[in-house]
Image (cartoon, rainbow, N blue to C red):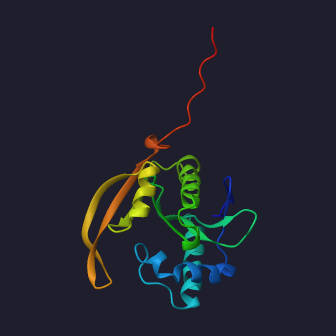
Amino acid sequence: MTIPILHTHRLLLREIVEADAGAIMQIRGDYEVTRHNIGAAYTDIAQAQRLIAGIREDCAAGVPRWGITLKPDTLLIGMVGFNTLSETDRRASIGFDLAQAHWGSGIMSEALRCVLTYGFETLNLNRIEADTSEHNTASQALLRKLGFREEGRQREQFYEDGAFHDLVLWGLLRREYPPNPPPRPAPAPA
């Protein structure tokens, strides 16, 4: 699968390439970025290189993931895309991470809206899922804002920092998106 370039007002979502290893190492090497979503912070550039190779394999198999850049810059500041995709069930799971310097700026909301629209409209998905650590309140708030509904909890699903933690499960159906559609124009007076 060729990864299409996606545009938003401020962002360019593009293919993740080998040259992004340093940027990925900076993002995933930050404990604050990784602690609630993806496990231990990276300690070696080889980890970033392996991630890129895995993303490229997934993309070739039809599971797209994009690098997030701020226009007009090409420096990767985050990643967003699908972790799994089932064409049969028209269902996918989504994942995302962003450099800490860009938290709270609305970048991930903008990027996720673009990817959700791509998933529902281009990939013809019916359902998009996500999961978060019970402690990741920022991601939970973002998912709620985008219309995801909390669907359940896997108790003590993962072990991290010396304790077991719950994983919160989220789902968004095509018919529920977008959560706040733009108002329809009023009909012309007769």
Q: For the C terminus, give its image quadrant.
A: top right
Q: Is residue 15 visible from the viewing direction of this image?
A: yes
Q: Residue 108's quadrant in the figure?
A: bottom right
The picture places residue 167, in percent across and down from the top left corner, at 31, 67
Q: Is residue 61 visible from the viewing direction of this image?
A: no
The picture places residue 48, in percent across and down from the top left corner, at 57, 83
Placement of 38 over or under 10, stated as above or below: below
Total labels drawn: 0
Q: Residue at 59% across / 21% down in the picture?
A: 186
Position of 79 with respect to 142 (left or right) is right
- 9 or 154: nearer the viewer: 9
Position of 19 with respect to 62 (left or right) is right
Q: Residue at 67% across / 66% down in the picture?
A: 69
Q: Residue at 66% across / 53% down in the picture?
A: 8
Q: For the N terminus, give its image quadrant.
A: bottom right
Outermost residue, top side: 190
Q: Residue at 59% across / 49% down in the picture?
A: 122
- 148 or 138: nearer the viewer: 138
Q: Residue 156's quadrant in the figure?
A: bottom left
Placement of 119 over or under 154, stated as above or below: above
Outermost residue, left side: 155
Placement of 125 over or under 64, stated as above or below: above
